[in-house]
Image (cartoon, rainbow, N blue to C red):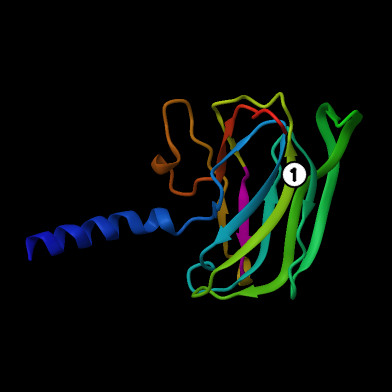
Amino acid sequence: MKAYLAASAIILATSPALAHVSLETSEAPVGSTYKAVFRVPHGCEGKPTNVVRVQIPEGVISVKPQPKPGWTLEKVRGAYGQSYDYYGTPTSEGVKEVIWSGGNLGDDEYDEFVLRGYLTPGLPVGQTLYFPVVQECPEGAAERWIEIPAEGQSSDDLELPAPGIKLLEKTSGH
């Protein structure tokens, strides 16, 4: 019985960590295309999610979101902090935020929101790149997955961590 209770306590203690928006693939090489699959496991405290907003971090360019049936797709464009070389073409502006709206993801349902983008070669290998996400629900309710760990912290230390990927060295042949 003690072992059962201990196992139950561990499951309960780790459950909140499983309830946040996360990325299906947790690492990717710089200088390559990355398919970001944002896993949204629930709505907002009993209310359905109607809007999912993803902020695109600096250094991720040529973003193309995947449309979702039943949702309206909006791409917010703007200037990048610098110009990037995208396969020989100078690129200084593009999608800075992707918004899926008008859908209905029940609090007891799960869905995925997908985009692809190019991870520029100058991104810092070995570090984590974060994509802040906001889930909006009726009556002004929202889940803001926007916290980025400070030096010496990990995402596990945060209540509402932004999903992130670890940046790896570019592999040969890409």
Q: For residue 83, what is the image quadrant? A: top right
Farthest right residue? 89
**For the point 61% across and 60% down, which residue is it?**
135
State the residue position of label 1: 117
Residue 173 position within the rendered picture, expressed as x and y whole percent measured from the top left: 71, 31
**For the point 42% across and 57% down, which residue is it?**
18
Q: Between 91 and 160, which is closer to the camera in this rendering?
A: 91
Q: Name the kind of residue labelled 1 in the image.
A: Gly
**For the point 54% across and 73% down, which residue is it?**
47
Q: Of helix, strand and loop, which one carries label 1?
A: strand
Dot 1, crowdedness within 10 Å: few (<14), some or many (≥20)? some
Residue 158 position within the rendered picture, expressed as x and y whole percent measured from the top left: 43, 43
Farthest left residue? 1
Vertical comparison of 164 with 2: above or below: above
The magenta stretch spans which residues?
131-137
Q: Quadrant of the N terminus?
A: bottom left
